[in-house]
Amino acid sequence: MRTQVCIIGGGPSGLLLSQLLNLKGIETVVLERKSRDYVLGRIRAGVLERGMVGLLREAGCAERMDIEGHPHEGCNLSTQHGMFRIDFKSLVNEEVMVYGQTEVTRDLYAAQDRIGATVIHDAADVAIHDPKSDAPYVTYRKDGVEHRVDCDYIAGCDGFHGVSRQTIPTGVRQEFERVYPFGWLGILSETAPAAEELVYANHPRGFALASMRSATLSRYYVQVPLSDKVEDWTDQMFWDELRRRLPAEVAEPMQTGPSIEKSIAPLRSFVCEPMQFGRLFLVGDAAHIVPPTGAKGLNLAASDVHYLSRALIAFYGAGDRQGIETYSATALKRIWGAMRFSWWMTSVLHRFPEASEFDQKIQESELLQLEEVESARRTMALNYVGLPY
Ligand code: APR
Ligand code: PHB
């Protein structure tokens, strides 16, 4: 088989890239290791920056998001002094869209189906060959048969555990990482959200977040030690702990009910440089991971897709190689901005087991500054709604 761009991974990065390229007449083949149901079974964050919202509209798959998504003009921070609001609208005249990543992925699959794009599921043993040559190709196995895709370019959209990043030789690749000493225990429950907007809480017992998917579906998280196991947490224990950490005005009226999903995720910051090697480009989680505080994971994937799709469209349309040559540097500049913000939000909102009393005082002072200084809130709002592309 021959295509112009072979895309490895059918998560949000791969599907959005495929959709944007196809709409401009560029041929793609998406190779996904898992089944569609498996990909759609993953539950992840649900806050979309304006840039991502714009890309979904451009990709022709925003119809349901525009009806069912909830624009939010602010979020709340809770500290030992009480709760205060970061008003995105008044601070930076922007909003975010609350709409789950699972729904985004579902809409992207539907859009790919509508235009007849090639998405191959259950593709095993995907391997990248000759990325530094002018004739790269990708091989995979399906139903016991070996296949080969010849292409001009390869987009590695295969997430943190994929093969694409590993294809870049260790002598070329540099990795930057911070692992945090805690995880997030999250649940999804068919209950009305506890508050109209998200509530991020810094509490002596640890961080908590009240989020939502819709008027009848809530998503909540509490910070837990890495040694905790999800089986150790009954629903009742979760609700009791969440109630202790949220401010009383949110916790007391909060509806509780059985969890329909419960999991623990570790927190990590990770960046791979460079994000391109010959004709291979890394996109999304394949190149970087952020802790979920600030909900930047999916949005960063979207900005990579923005830069790479523009670059490939300029190349195929006008022979312009500039975007292709500078993809890694352009994408990384914005990625480090979001890395800094996610690290900062994680640092100010969590309780670190090794923190000294001095560290604790600094954290409290940082939160107080946010509460009292408008320019500090504006900087936070600017980053939360998303730095421009
Ligand atoms: N071959 C083919 N497909 C692969 C391989 C492989 N060797 N390894 C992984 N994949 C697939 C995974 O099954 C997954 O569907 O690549 C896809 C990668 O999807 P994600 O992990 O969702 O990564 P990405 O598309 O970059 O999405 C960005 O935003 O909110 C964050 O981490 C969250 O998923 C999210 C991300
Ligand atoms: C979520 O709704 O899952 C969510 C929202 C905001 C975050 C992280 C996760 O910062």
Image (tube, helix red, strand yellow):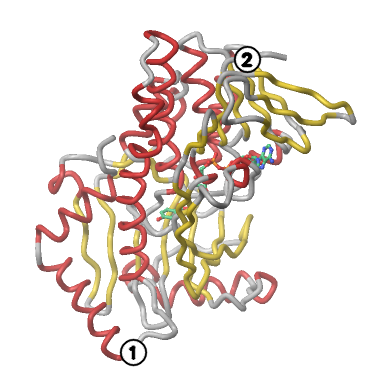
Tag 1 and tag 2, C-beta contact below 8 Å: no
Q: Nearer the viewer, residue 241 or 53?
A: 53
Residue 187 can be seen in this image: yes
* Residue pictured at 88% horizontal, 29% vertical: 143
Label 2 beta carbon less than 8 Å to ligand 1: no
Q: Is residue 296 above or below residue 32?
A: below
Quadrant of the rendering where the N terminus is positioned? top right
Left/right of residue 10 with respect to residue 239 in the rendered view: right
Q: Nearer the viewer, residue 157 or 216?
A: 157
Give me the disc on residue 3.
Answer: 2
**What whole-number distance in Å separates the C-alpha atoms at marks 1 and 2?**
56 Å
Residue 351 pos. (x, y %): 39, 78
Label 1 beta carbon less than 8 Å to ligand 2: no
Helix, strand or loop under label 1: loop
Residue 322 pos. (x, y %): 34, 23
Tell me the quadrant of ligand 1: top right
Front disc: 1 or 2: 2
Most distant residue in the right direction: 144
Residue 112 pos. (x, y %): 58, 19
* Residue pictured at 56% horizontal, 56% vertical: 189
Q: Residues within 10 Å of mark 2 (few under 14, many from 20)?
A: some
* Residue pictured at 31% horizontal, 69% vertical: 249
Helix, strand or loop under label 2: loop
Residue designated by label 1: 356
Task: Check disc 1 and give the amino acid type.
Answer: Ser
Q: Residues within 10 Å of mark 1 (few under 14, many from 20)?
A: few
Residue 104 can be seen in this image: no
**Circle nearer the N terminus (1, 2):** 2
Residue 280 pos. (x, y %): 54, 32
Q: Is residue 124 above or below residue 87?
A: above
Left/right of residue 99 with respect to residue 28 in the rendered view: left
Q: Is residue 225 above or below residue 266?
A: below
